[in-house]
Amino acid sequence: MTLIPPYDHAHVMAGQGTAALELLQDVPQLDTLIVAGAGG
């Protein structure tokens, strides 16, 4: 097994940023995007 921290890992952070970009592309009229500010 490999431990991947839920927030302090480069691949996790890149995936979260990509997910937000894809969401904003799919829903351009989106006014607010609320995201978690901590891990775990």
Image (cartoon, rainbow, N blue to C red):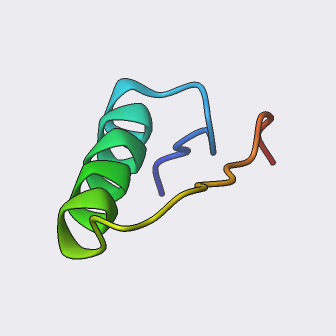
Residue occupying the point 61% across, 38% down = 5
- Report whether 9 appears left or right of 15: right
- Report whether 25 appears left or right of 4: left
Position of residue 32 relative to residue 27, above or below, is above
Q: Which of 35 and 3 is in front in this view?
A: 35
> Residue 24 location, x and y as percent?
30, 59
Occupied quadrant, residue 28: bottom left
Q: Which of 35 and 8 is in front in this view?
A: 35
Work out which residue is located at the far bottom of the displayed protein and give it.
Answer: 26
Q: Which of 4 and 32 is in front in this view?
A: 32
- Report whether 37 appears left or right of 7: right
Q: Which of 24 and 19 is in front in this view?
A: 24
Q: How many numbered discs? A: 0
> Residue 33 location, x and y as percent?
58, 55
Residue occupying the point 37% across, 25% down = 10
- Report whether 26 appears left or right of 8: left
> Residue 23 location, x and y as percent?
32, 66
Position of residue 12 relative to residue 25, above or below, is above
Position of residue 37 relative to residue 26, above or below, is above
> Residue 36 location, x and y as percent?
74, 47
